[in-house]
Amino acid sequence: MPAIFITGANRGIGLGLAAYYLAQGWHVFAACRQPEQASALHEAEQHYPGLLTLVALDVTADASIDTAWQQVSAKTTHLDVLINNAGVLHPSAKADDLTAVMLHEAFAVNTIAPFMVARRFGDLLHAGAKLVNITMPTQPITRLVRRENHAYVASRYALNALTKMLALEWAERGIISVGLYPGYLQTDMNQHAAAAKPLTEGIPLVANVIATLTAEHNGLCLLPDGKAYEW
Ligand SMILES: NC(=O)c1ccc[n+]([C@@H]2O[C@H](COP(=O)([O-])OP(=O)(O)OC[C@H]3O[C@@H](n4cnc5c(N)ncnc54)[C@H](OP(=O)(O)O)[C@@H]3O)[C@@H](O)[C@H]2O)c1
């Protein structure tokens, strides 16, 4: 049975992905900060007995990452897919809105955590396994015109660099590491914006991109239509 580990799986895109893979018969390790309060995951547990393992994980805490790894590695020796999905966005419209706390939090969750989770769980990834870091497509900085959400944007540039560097190193082990933009999808992060797509439309596209990943995609940033984006 294929196995997948997803961070931030209690709501939004993470929950949508967990539900999608459960419906496909995968074993889903659904990680979230407070599993006891993850009511949608508890419902899914009833619906798919034996397929879902809830994992307590605050992605910013090394000890929590280690405990989560112990729980998962006690149940499986391999993960087919690891999705670093947990993320935070602290809105800012201009530089004066930005605080050091916003920057620290954005980098802790959006940049450092995906790297630390990937590294800790790396021994469960074997040749052909896929490391998917959910991100935004960052243009080369010469073309950067964004003037909002500074902490989020900067943290994603840094994540994308780390994803590429890990992809270069782990290619030797046959692991496929990518950045993946899920599309603009209705979640709490954008207050379920009318201009965004519903998760029911977006999640199958994301899952399809993941399903079709091959070694040729290693080190790329992919869009929901499967095309590569120059980052
Ligand atoms: N929605 C979009 O249009 C869009 C577009 C591009 C990229 N993304 C990315 O997609 C990912 C999912 O976003 P979303 O739209 O589903 O947002 P969301 O509904 O706000 O969900 C964010 C998830 O991240 C979790 N999280 C935050 N900090 C965490 C921490 N320290 N430890 C563990 N989990 C933590 C949250 O858990 P709690 O419930 O415990 O807070 C929640 O499960 C993010 O990385 C986001 O940047 C989203």
Image (cartoon, helix red, strand yellow):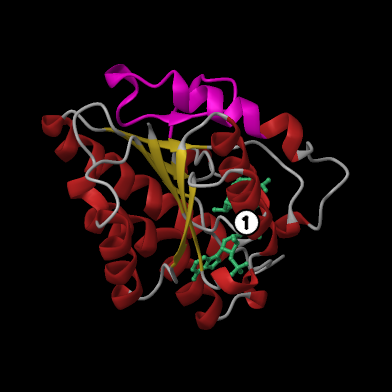
Instruction: Give the vertical position of 95 relative to 153 (above or below).
Output: below
User: The N terminus appears in which quarter of the rendering?
Assistant: top left
Ligand 1 lies in which image quarter? Answer: bottom right
In the rendering, at what x and y percent does residue 123 appear? 17, 48
Rendering quarter of residue 184: top right
Q: Nearer the viewer, residue 79 or 146?
A: 79
In the displayed structure image, the side of residue 207 where residue 84 appears, left or right? left
Does the magenta run of residues contain 226?
yes
Q: Nearer the viewer, residue 39 or 219?
A: 39
In the rendering, at what x and y percent does residue 36 appear? 59, 73
Q: Which residue is mark 1?
A: 41
Instruction: Give the vertical position of 72 relative to 107 (above or below).
Output: above
Three-letter amino acid code of the residue under disc 1: Leu
In the rendering, at what x and y percent does residue 90 appear? 64, 69
In the displayed structure image, the side of residue 229 where residue 91 appears, left or right? right
Question: Magenta residues, as a range?
Answer: 203-231
In the rendering, at what x and y percent does residue 64 appear? 35, 74
Does the magenta run of residues contain 221?
yes
Q: Name which residue lies at 55% across and 76% down.
A: 102
Q: Name which residue lies at 33% across and 19% down.
A: 214
Rendering quarter of residue 92: bottom right
Q: Nearer the viewer, residue 142 or 14?
A: 14
Q: Name which residue lies at 34% across and 65% down.
A: 68
| Residue extending farthest right | 194
Instruction: Give the vertical position of 206 relative to 211 (above or below).
Output: below
